[in-house]
Every structure is written in C-alpha cells, then in structure tokens.
Amino acid sequence: MQSLSKGEHVERILLNEKELDLHFVQQQDSVLRLFVLNLNPSDRTTANIFVEQQGTNCTTEIYSLNVLRGTQTCTLQTHITHSGCEGTSVQLIKFVLSDQSRGEYLGEMKIQPDAQHIDAQQTNRNLLLSDTAEMRTRPQLEIYADDVKAGHGASTGQLDDQALFYMQQRGIGRDEARRMLIAAFCKDIVLPLSDEQQREQLMETIDRIIQ
C-alpha cells in the first residue's frame, strides 16, 4: 500500500504489466494520476487498482488503454472510495479488441456518507475490430452522500463505417483510414500525460502496434 501525504503529487505509467495489484491511500490535497497501458500484453493480463481518498480536496485520475489481439485476455478492476470531502476522480478506460481476444472491466466507485461535494466520473469505451472479440463491462456506483456529482458511462462498438467512407472519398485508402480512426480512439488516453516526451513516445508506440 502506498500512502500519498498532504499535497503530494504522483504520476505513474505502468506499461505491459502482466499482473498489477495496487493500493493507494490519499491524504489532503494529494493528486494521483495513473496510466495503465497494455500495448503488447501477455496472453493473460490482470490489474486490480484500489484507491481511497481519506483526505479533503484529493484528485484521482486513472487512464487505461488495452490493445488485445489473438486469444489474449485482460481483466481490469478499479475501486475508488471517496471518504473525504471535495474530492475529484476521473476514470477513462478503453479497450481495443481484435481476433478472439477478451476484455473485462469492473469499475467500482463508492462515495461514503461524510464525503460531500464530490465529483466522480467513470467512462469505459470499447472498440471491437472483429465479430469474435468479446468485451464485458460491469460498472458499480454506490452513493451514500447527498451533495455529489457522479456518473458513469460505457459503450462498445465497431469502427464508424460512415467515417471510413468519408475518408476514402477524400483519397485516403481504407487501411490507412482504418488505422487513423483506431489511433484517434486510442490517443486521448495518453494526452493527459504531463511529460511531453513520454506522451510522444507512447503515441509512436500506439501508431506502430495498430499498423
């Protein structure tokens, strides 16, 4: 378990980790930003992330991109508990699945009775590139306080045929148009990175793996 002290800022990139089991406790005014990316994962990948905001005015941000192919599987679980007031949490979770790959996401948010003035948002977006890929999503939201703003959303779909057609009409080959749309879907996961060099390197890696 890692404890973030008052005012501490932590930003971590976790790339192609086969197994993750992370526990964080945040104190007043601390900021935690996690980037969990599986761009060349093992056949089976699991990640469990637990965060408790104990102090007031804490910020938690979790960004995750999982690009799976073949028969690869990935299970990601995030658990955020707001115990202190005036906290913020943002979760943006994305999966790109092709072939016979399987993805699963369990996202749990809990806002305790004394945790007022909370803004908690969870978003899960999934892109299926084959008819045999499979994605399961299970959002869970428990709110026990009155004055909060919280929400979650999840969607699973395929590439936009109209967008592909539009790009082809403007002279872009179908394969290149397809690659550009997948890249656009992926890249907003790494855009929040504060280090510009790391951001560019990860974007280049994403471009390579979706060729």
Image: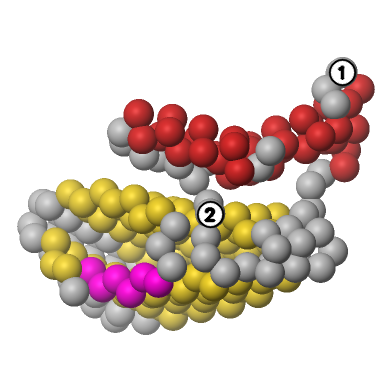
The reply to whether dot 2 and dot 1 touch (C-beta < 8 Å) is no
Residue bearing mark 1: 171
Above or below 96: residue 205: above
In this rendering, would 126 be left or right of 117? Answer: right
Please tell me whether residue 21 belongs to the stretch shown in magenta.
Answer: yes
Q: Is residue 157 left or right of residue 31?
A: right
Q: Which residues are magenta?
A: 19-24
What amino acid is found at the position of numbered circle 1 in the picture? Gly
Q: Residue at x 21, y 51 (%)?
A: 10
Main SS of the magenta part reads strand
- Density class for disc 1 (Cα within 10 Å; few <14, some 14-19, many ≥20) is few
Depth check: 208 or 153 in front? 208
Front label number (2 vs 1): 2
Residue pointed to by mark 2: 40
* Residue pictured at 63% horizontal, 68% vertical: 72
Dividing the picture into quarters, in which one does residue 43 lie? bottom right
Q: For residue 180, what is the image quadrant? A: top right
Query: Is residue 70 part of the magenta span, yes or no?
Result: no
Secondary structure state at the residue bearing disc 1? loop
Please give left or right for residue 84 compared with residue 173 in the image: left
Q: Nearer the viewer, residue 143 or 6?
A: 6
- Badge 2 crowding class, 10 Å Cα cut-off, few under 14, some 14 to 19, many 20 or more, is some
Relative depth, front residue between 84 and 196: 196
Percent from the top left, x then y, of residue 51? 29, 70
